Image: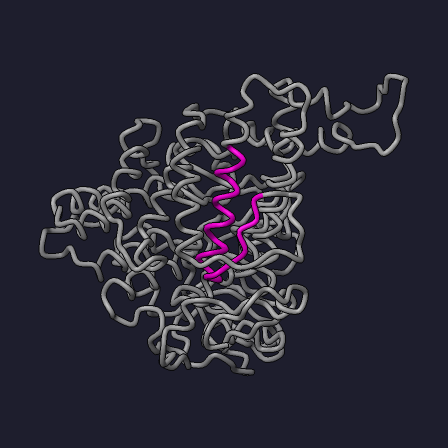
Amino acid sequence: MKRRKLFIITCTVLLAGGITQSCTKLDKKVYSVEPVGNFYQTPDQIAAGVAPAYIALQNIPDGNVNQMNEITSDEVIVPTRGNDWYDGGQWQGLWLHKFKPDVFVDGGWSDLNNGIGKVNFTLNILGGLPNKPANFDAIVAELKVLRAYFIFQLMDMYGNVPLVTDYNTDPSKVTQKTRAEVYAFLETELNTNVPLLTTTVDKTTYGRITQFGGYMLLAKLYLNAQVYTGTAQWAKAITALNQVINSGKYSLQPNYFDNFSINNDGSTENIFVVPFDKVHIGGNNWEMQTLHYSSNATYGLTGQPWNGFCSTADVYNKYEVADIRRTQYLVGQQYASDGVTPLSDPQANLPVIFDPNITSISDASGLFRMKGARNVKYHPEAGTSGGQSNDMVIFRLADAYLMLAEASLHTGDAATALTAVNRVRQRAGVANWAAGDLTYASLLDERSRELAWEGWRRNDLIRNEVASGTKYFTGARTPAKTDDGDTHTFLFPIPAPELISNSNLHQNPGY
């Protein structure tokens, strides 16, 4: 077991028998459980108390939210392979921007609101404690910043959303706030609470939101301010990013792939991660989603992968041949673990040769089963069938550098932008850019190369489309996607189940 994952694992065990509520007054001392009034006094109790809010994160980097943010972009496609991966057209609908207010878009809404609800519940418990812990303000601030992350994602994806910050809120009274109102709330909430967070970066804070994770979230908010409010805030984004970059707490990991490896808890670059573990914390199914059915023979997996998620040639060809990041994609003939025996597809009676050139979104032919470059950034783990142990990244330093480059270019500071982006390129093993290479379009491509499949691509494309007018998100692309016609697809529809359950909610335009 990884040393630094003990935080979440220990908390889960403590929660199983450590926090209960009773409807009956007992005069006798209870020895099997810890009364809530006596809880939150030791570091272990505090960690266990906040754990439910963090556990809600496990559905974010490999679940509905990530899928909705990636498959709607140019970065990930899930083609229909015969009878596989049609599922009512939901995967095609994401790629084609044919969004429906159905159960699928409800998944992201539910996962994010689940996180908000878990935080609100924990804050409610904390507020009622007769004996407040010594670091009460810091605990509350940590939970509020974590809640801000869930709210940020909800607002980014769905636009005008409910803003519920009290666990005792009457559900029938919940209404939507405008994006500008949610933005203003988040700005105040983060500027108030982030300075109260810990600056300690070690095993005790691994997997938890620190001051630096909070500043990354604030920088994301400011970087996208033009999308949310109509007014850009590039300078404010730079100020928040410098809090992270100049802290001295992080450095680029010399090996890019160490940030995503099975034992990536030692990364000096990762700022905020969601821990996973093959025994205790399931949910990271990257290997199963992308690899071919026969790829278990390559990586020693205990089950057949699902042959689904992949990338097109347009994405793969953005990389120079010398770029080490290019090797996160598998293309060409695949082999068994001995590196010699070619893999074959028994059903199609064809060799497994991954081809990134996807010209159709649906094809029943055997050859189509091998279409698409497969991504193994989070390296598959032998002996697993999903549930791999790689911790999944939400924020890391390379993203901070690229955000700084983009914001600096917008403020006219090309020198800072060039220095920042070249730090990332040097680690990738490719030549530094000269001043003439630095454009908004080239930075967007660099973000694609560096942050592939990390859940930010939809956000990046929309921001750059709003800033430039170029149809990065709404335009046509291969295969099959036509021009959206307008920008209503910047937002997902409010899910129908939510509209039915709360008549105060109103659908987004265009749906």
Residue 347 rendering spot, x and y as whole percentages: 62, 75
Task: Provide the residue span drawn in magenta.
Answer: 142-165
Residue 481 rendering spot, x and y as whole percentages: 40, 79
The number of callouts visible is 0
- The residue at 49%/48% (across/down) is 379
Is 19 located above or below residue 375 in the figure? above
The chosen color scheme is: one colour
Q: Nearer the viewer, residue 92 or 36?
A: 36
Q: State the image quarter where residue 505 is shown.
A: bottom right
- The residue at 38%/58% (across/down) is 459
Q: State the image quarter where residue 192 is shown.
A: top left
Q: Which quadrant: the N terminus?
A: top right
Q: Nearer the viewer, residue 218 or 394?
A: 218
Tell me: 231 left or right of 195: left
Is 445 located above or below residue 284 in the figure? below
Is 150 contained in the magenta span? yes
Residue 418 rendering spot, x and y as whole percentages: 16, 46
Q: Main secondary structure of the magenta part?
A: helix
Residue 263 rendering spot, x and y as whole percentages: 50, 36
- The residue at 35%/27% (across/down) is 249
